[in-house]
Image (spheres, rainbow, N blue to C red):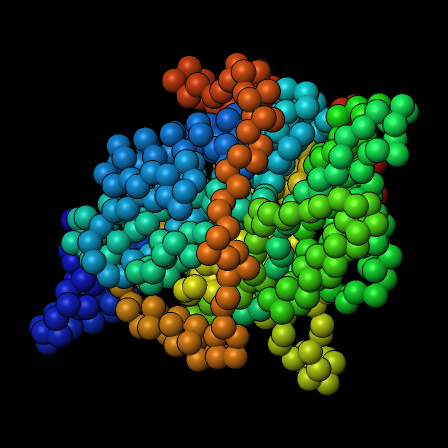
Amino acid sequence: MKRTLLSLLGTLLLTTAAPTVIAQTKRAKKALIDPIEQLKQEAALSVEQSAKLGQEINDMLFSFAELGFQEEETARYLTGLLEKNGFTIQRGIAGMPTAWLAIWGNGKPVIALGSDVDCIPKASQKPGVAYHDPLVAGAPGHGEGHNSGQALNIISALAVKKIMERDKIPGTLVLWPGVAEELVGAKAYFVRDGYFKNVDACIFTHVSNNLSVSYGDAGNNGLISVKFLFEGQAAHAAGAPWRGKSALDAVELMNVGWNFRREHLELTQRSHYVISDGGDQPNVVPSKASVWYYFRDRSYPKIKRLFDVGMKMAEGASLMTDTKFTYEVLGSAWPGHFNQPIAETMYENIKKVGLPTWDANDQLLAKATQIEMEASKIEGLATKLDTIGLPADMPVASMGGQIMRSMGGGSDDIADISWALPTVVLRYPSNIPNLPGHHWSNAISMATPIAHKGIVAGAKVEAMTLIDMLMKPEIIKKAWDYYRDEQTKEMEYTPLVGPKDFPATYLNKEIMTEYKPSLQKYYYDPAKYPTYLEQLGISYPTISETQRAKIKELEAKGK
Ligand SMILES: [Zn+2]
């Protein structure tokens, strides 16, 4: 009762300036706590009460293990769940069958909550087991923990929705999935096709091993993902090789050219390729072959330049082999830039929530996994909260005010959203530190109490930040001031995908068709089993005798 009255006062304070209300609120403040703080505590409590739902969503997505653009079960399950909870669903957005929006509420502000949903090829792994033990050998698996972010967003959104309904707080929540993030295949299309046009701010969530947020230039690379398809002429490889024009030779020559040129490229670039088609069999000169490149660098112009060099290599290779080539853009991402006012608001809530309390079993699994992966530090899970992440282009005092040059790194197409509207990425501690990434070992914690606790901590931060954004309109205003006056002052967003490019939704189809029947046997059934670990009959944690001995040895040394 007290709570309801206080939160009502909070709402009234925003909508009217009646002196009696202000006086009452002041009294409330003195007597108890700030009404907005009160709402935030309520939201956090409500999140805690939804921990079970968070665990179910997380474990369910883990068991689906779907690759980019093939997130069919994931989409069906999440949209069904959100629909049941009163959200209006738009399915198949931006030409992607597995993309959707779930909308609830009325009026401004419109706040979008996103998180990736796809997994990693060949990363299948039993959760809670600290060594390689795939659920289905060769199958995809959540080796980046993309099964957890939607669980976080949904339990925080439901907590805030409940408060908004009760106190009639205006605002709209839009939940959405990062489809095919591993292919950076979707978000630039969401922006291009106008799905974020009327959104005031976006909170994105991504698994990590600490609770953190950053602002400004994220210091990472953007990229363009391009497949080069060569076409030559088939011939009997022994009987009449002179009549053949090998498309595979073109692919190999392009790669040789690129690898020589690599020495003369900027140090911030990262480029890599796979031969996606190398022909059929040795006795037939390959008439078709293709190679798929990621060209990464620190800025839009640099990425474009890298792509231009790639085109030259392809042209050269086609001249040398008398073959023809075409290319297809399969994905893209800008380098990230995140919003300072929202990040600072969020970081205050991160400090209030703090890291989860890990128990001995959580730490045992983490240390055993670090030992298994020969990590640089065998330190278990994070117990010290991260500081707020600062811009990569910020002058460093200890370097006499010079800017430390970022050497680049990975990419995430959330950056394209971050250039379209004020955006932050909330990182939450559901994974084990010091692992290689994009790897089966990164799936080990992802359907265990480590992931579940990380989700609850993250959801509390998100829910509290949502309350801040709904109740204090100046946050959104400042967020747009920063976006306009600082972020985009000298840099204009031009998408790396053109008007004629389309999402490559056919990618991964064959792999999923091959593995889905085997994976289906392991889909999580929450009606029968409290957790996925129990369904699989895994005792937590499962670690080897060697790992146990090594941990004892380290502990004896006081490490
Ligand atoms: Zn990711």
Query: Does residue 3 appear anywhere in the picture?
Result: no
Quadrant location, the C terminus: top right
Is residue 307 found left or right of 24 in the rendered image? right
Query: Does residue 241 appear anywhere in the picture?
Result: yes
Residue 39: x and y in percent read 28, 55
Residue 522: x and y in percent read 53, 17
Residue 217: x and y in percent read 58, 68
What residue appears at the point 43 percent right and 72 percent down from the top-left corner? 483
Above or below 164: residue 220 = below
Is residue 457 found left or right of 261 in the rendered image? left
In-front residue for pair 272/414: 272
Above or below 232: residue 7 = below
What residue appears at the point 20 percent right and 54 percent down from the top-left corner? 106
Above or below 487: residue 328 = above
In-front residue for pair 42/56: 56
Residue 260: x and y in percent read 87, 57
What residue appears at the point 71 percent right and 40 percent down from the top-left corner? 231
In-front residue for pair 180/124: 180
Above or below 355: residue 143 = above
What residue appears at the point 14 percent right and 65 percent down from the top-left corner? 12
The quarter holding residue 6 reads bottom left
